[in-house]
Structures are given as C-alpha cells and as structure tokens.
Image (cartoon, grey):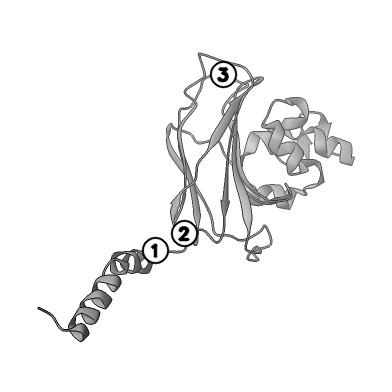
C-alpha cells in the first residue's frame, strides 16, 4: 500500500499528464504571416472572357489592396495616348479607353469596390498585368500590407476573386479571415450570376490558405 504522501504525488502527476499533448500542440502552432490564393486557370477562346481580379477588403468593405487585375479590364486593348475612342485629350477619353467602361461586365464588383475611376494610370499599372498566356495554376499572395506598403491593422479581412467567365456570366469567390489567425485553410463561398457551360472551367480549384 502507498502512504498518503505517495498517493498525493501520483495524483499530481496524473493531473499534469493530460495537459502535455495540448501544450505540445500549442507550441507547434504558427501565426500566419501571409495569405495565399490559388486557382486553376483555363484560357478561353474569343472575346468577353478571360478577365479576373483578386483583392482584399477590410471589415468595413474598403479595398485595402488589389493583388491583381487583368490588363484589358483596366487599360483596354491599346495603351498610350491613342485609345479606342481616339486621341487622349480629356479625362473622359482617358477613362473610356479603360476596358471596363466599354465592356461593363469586366469584373464589375472590383470596379465598383475599388473605385476604379479614381485610380491613376500609375496606380493601375501597379496592380494590373497581362491575362495569363497559357492555362495553369495561378497564385497570388498578400503580406498583410496595404497599397502603400504599410502593414494593415490587425483584425478581420476578406479575400475576393472575381472572374468574368463570358459576358455577364460572372463568378465571385470570397472568404473571411483574421490577421491574428494561425496558419489554416480559409473557407470560401462562391456565387455565379449566369450559368455558362462552355466557359465554366475558366476558374476552378480555388483555394485560400493562411501560411
């Protein structure tokens, strides 16, 4: 038989043991420092398709950073002083040569939320790029910094991916997360304005991960 002191010691050890795996698990948790969005892009034929944008909004619905938007959406087919409407002579002409003004179905949520009309050419150049020339996985990362390169306040944010599959068939993904979260997969939801069987595979296998 154990004496009283030995029993107390055994009970104390048993009480501590279950906490060890939890402590070990907590010590291996990693606070996220970047959000990564990836998807499979399948290039489509013809006009009216192949346009998309990726951006982040804060809890107030303000765009804090646009990670990418296809160049046609913002700049149209022609760059420089000669735009689709003729020589650039006024601000109106400057705006009209942007693709979304004569093709309003180009990622309209991003255009509205990012207040695209207020962005300068320099700002547009910083966030836009050519539509991928070939099909394949596309990956975009956010380092928790705004468009000015400043770290955003800790808190809740949303990642968005909007794609114009074809004309008014528009696919929108979104997912909420916090900059305080540990590394994990971000749950995404999606909406589609109009079904389009021919162009449905333009954007697939969308994933968002905090790393």
On the image, numbered disc 1 is attached to which residue? Answer: 29
Image quarter hosting the N terminus: bottom left
Left or right, residue 170 beside residue 60: left
Residue 135 occupies quadrant: top left
Residue at the outermost bottom position: 5
Of marks 3 and 1, which one's residue comes earlier in the chain? 1
On the image, numbered disc 3 is attached to which residue? Answer: 46
Residue 79 occupies quadrant: top right
Residue at the location (65% across, 62% down)?
Answer: 152
On the image, numbered disc 2 is attached to which residue? Answer: 182
Where residue 201 appears, x then y in whole percent? 47, 23
Q: Residues within 10 Å of mark 3 (few under 14, many from 20)?
A: few
Task: Report helix, strand or loop for mark 2.
Answer: loop
Q: Relative to 100, is 156 above or below?
A: below
Q: Are marks 1 and 2 in contact (CB under 8 Å)?
A: yes
| Mark 3 or mark 1, whichever is nearer to me | 1
Nearer to us in this view, 209 or 140:
209
Where residue 182 appears, x then y in whole percent? 46, 59
Of marks 1 and 2, which one's residue comes earlier in the chain? 1
Q: Are marks 3 and 2 in contact (CB under 8 Å)?
A: no
Where residue 191 appears, x then y in whole percent? 60, 27
**Residue 45 shows in this picture:** yes
Residue at the location (61% across, 47% down)?
Answer: 158
Nearer to us in this view, 62 or 183:
183
Q: Residues within 10 Å of mark 2 (few under 14, many from 20)?
A: some
Residue at the location (52% across, 19% down)?
Answer: 199
Cα–Cα gap, marks 3 and 1? 47 Å
């Amino acid at each position: 038989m154990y004496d009283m002191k030995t029993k107390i010691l055994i009970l104390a050890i048993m009480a501590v043991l279950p906490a060890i795996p939890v402590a070990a698990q907590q010590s291996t948790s990693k606070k996220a420092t970047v959000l990564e969005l990836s998807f499979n892009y399948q290039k489509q034929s013809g006009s009216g398709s192949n346009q998309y944008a990726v951006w982040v909004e804060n809890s107030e619905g303000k765009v804090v950073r646009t990670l990418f938007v296809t160049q046609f959406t913002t700049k149209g087919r022609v760059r420089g002083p000669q735009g689709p409407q003729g020589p650039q002579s006024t601000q109106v002409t400057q705006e009209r040569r942007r693709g979304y003004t004569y093709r309003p179905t180009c990622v309209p949520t991003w255009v509205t939320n990012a207040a695209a009309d207020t962005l300068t050419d320099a700002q547009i150049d910083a966030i836009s790029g050519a539509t991928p020339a070939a099909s394949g996985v596309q990956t975009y990362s956010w380092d928790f910094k705004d468009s000015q390169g400043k770290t955003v306040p800790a808190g809740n944010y949303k990642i968005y991916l909007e794609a114009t599959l074809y004309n008014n068939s528009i696919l929108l993904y979104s997912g909420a997360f916090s900059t305080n979260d540990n590394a994990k997969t971000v749950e995404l939801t999606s909406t589609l304005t109009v079904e389009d069987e021919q162009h449905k595979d333009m954007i697939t296998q969308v994933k968002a991960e905090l790393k």
